[in-house]
Amino acid sequence: GQQLNQSPQSMFIQEGEDVSMNCTSSSIFNTWLWYKQDPGEGPVLLIALYKAGELTSNGRLTAQFGITRKDSFLNISASIPSDVGIYFCAEGGSQGNLIFGKGTKLSVKP
Amino acid sequence: DAGVTQSPTHLIKTRGQQVTLRCSPISGHKSVSWYQQVLGQGPQFIFQYYEKEERGRGNFPDRFSARQFPNYSSELNVNALLLGDSALYLCASSLPGQGLGGYTFGSGTRLTVV
């Protein structure tokens, strides 16, 4: 079955740092989506990518759809405290559903 | 406009009991999907309904069932609850033709089975 591998599983950030996370798949897909989930809430769409090689920004967030169509990365520049949360990559399943990775948890350095 | 609303927000059930979770989509959205999110994992697809018909089903046992009403709201039913059914249950709605990026999620129902 389809599997999405997200890394890292967790990371600590200090305000102002840049953050990078990625997602790889065992299969080729036509869509990559990045979501953020805050505690007690549902996932919220950050960026959607529909074409291999596509680079898209949303404020301080930038995501790219890998050329091989098997990977994607998400960068956050100049992180702020409200960036903490869990970030999920997702792609399309055979039934028009979403398949999610296990998430990357962003926390603030103590 | 109200977003996707789910009720109840939290509930506790005993093993073997049955539970019904409810979802109201965004006004105008005709497609509703259900996802289960176990602690520490990403959401997993359970069902998708469009125009009151089941359009997709994930790898879940027959204890899980759902339906969609004429007003496009939806219910998820789980029978014979197991401890492993404890999870956040998410509902998402979308307009037809919006594609995968068109899903809007509710805040979920946190189900605890004891």
Image (tube, coloured by chain):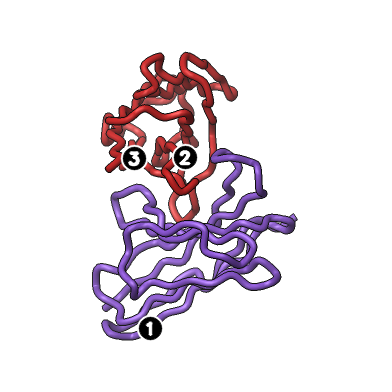
- For mark 1, what is the residue? B18
**Which dot, 2 or 3, sits closer to the camera?**
3
Q: Quadrant of the N terminus of chain A?
A: top left
Figure chain in red: A
> Which residue is depicted at the point 43% across and 21% down?
A75
Q: Quadrant of the C terminus of chain A?
A: top left
Label 2: how many Cα within 10 Å (few below 14, some 14–19, many 20+)? many
Q: What's the residue type where badge 1 is placed? A: Gln
- Left or right: where B88 falls relative to B68: left
| Residue A55: % across, % down | 52, 16
**Cβ atoms at labels 1 and 3 below 8 Å apart:** no
Same chain assignment for discs 2 and 1: no
- For mark 3, what is the residue? A101
> Which residue is depicted at the point 34% across and 72% down?
B62
Label 1: how many Cα within 10 Å (few below 14, some 14–19, many 20+)? some
* Of the image marks 2 and 3, the number of the one nearer the N terminus: 2
Q: What's the residue type where badge 3 is placed? A: Gly
How many numbered circles does the render carry?
A: 3
